[in-house]
Amino acid sequence: MSDGPEKPGFEDRLAAAEDAAQGPKRKAPGQSDAGSAQRAIELAMRLGVEMVAAMVIAVVIGWGLDRLLHTKPWLMILMVPVGLAAGMRNLLRADRGR
Amino acid sequence: MAGPSIDALGQFDLTTGLGAIGRAVNFTNSNEAMLAAAIIIVGMFAIGLKAKALVPGRIQALVEVLYEFVHHMCVDTIGEEGRKFFPLVFTIFSFILLGNLIGLFPYFFAFTSHIAVTLALALFVFVFSTAVGFYIHGFGFLKFFVPAGVPGWLLPLLVPIEIISYLSRPVSLSVRLFANMTAGHVMWEVFAGFMLLLTAGFGVFGAIASVVPLGLNVALAALELLVAGLQAYVFAILTCLYLHDAVHMH
């Protein structure tokens, strides 16, 4: 059985390789600089669209209801703060870390 | 003087492909790119999975990395139920990724730069995740729009806010992908147009100076590669997130 003495050698080498692979990750607690910058860009792109989208949907709903109910422009105006609030809600959701 | 001008949006025009047959059925260059993306991804998998080698070759390794990446994304985001939705998420991810990447090559069309395409994808995800929510929870899914731990008199205000926030999902999902791809391609076109304008306006000096926009375009190419991958990833992870909300309701 020549496997016997070789096995711990392989396990050691595997552990060393895994340590080496995880080395840079451990060095910076949390995230590395490049990773966090990329995440920040990603988040910034998301948040802007997130707010505008809620606003657009709210205004479109208000405008449509105005057309249906002939109450121009009051429902649209009413929906603007609601849309803003929904945008804020989206931001809070996006900030949940995902 | 009729010098060169910058036509930044001309690149997004739809033309028909595949000759006379394509003209007859309105098969556009966008459809060509979609078909190419689908064929590449299916072909890649057919070749990569044929080998079944224990030590994977290049294509098999690529296929396995792609598979595991999306699988982890599904299970980590949705939970154990994510396995059921893996085929959908993987299809969406690979289709958008290939579409973005194909669009980066000269003479190829980026179909994700059309809001019609991204909105169709986003609406499908939206309708599907809503249907999953109703399928799993029945009408109890409507409780998703009632935030927990809120006094009753605030509900008439908060429920519309939640509903609008929910309805804005397909808009933000589609606009993000569309805007990123369009903006990148427009910037490329504009910088390339600067080179022509400089050369036409200042002759030899202009031609030398146009090294600057050329360099910018090279840097932009790297950025666009990042954006292509990132936006496909964001679209897929948001799909997972919406499915998570539909499955777990929180």
Image: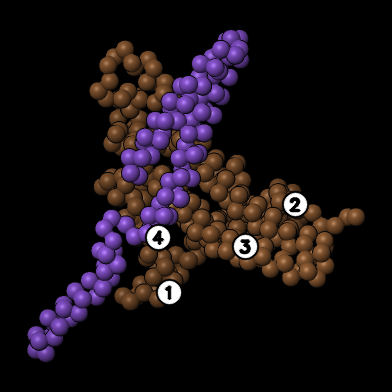
Residue at mark 2 to residue at mark 4: CA–CA distance:
35 Å
Q: Secondary structure at mark 4?
A: helix
User: The disc labelled 2 sits on which kind of residue?
Assistant: Asp
User: The disc labelled 3 sits on which kind of residue?
Assistant: Leu
Residue matched to label 3: B216
Residue B96 image point, x, y percent: 51, 52
Q: Return the residue found at the far bottom.
A: A2
Residue matched to label 2: B7
Q: Image quadrant of residue B221? A: bottom right
Residue B168's place in the image compared with B1, above or below, is above
Judging depth in this view, the residue of A25 and B38 nearest the camera is A25
Residue at mark 1 to residue at mark 4: CA–CA distance:
27 Å
Residue matched to label 4: A34
Q: Image quadrant of residue B213? A: bottom right
Which colour is chain A painted? purple
Write the residue at 43% across / 74% down: B58
Residue at mark 3 to residue at mark 1: CA–CA distance:
32 Å
Mark 1 or 4, which is nearer the eye?
A: 4
Do tags 3 and 4 sit on the same chain?
no
Residue matched to label 1: B58
Question: What chain is tagged by disc 2?
Answer: B
Do tags 2 and 1 sit on the same chain?
yes
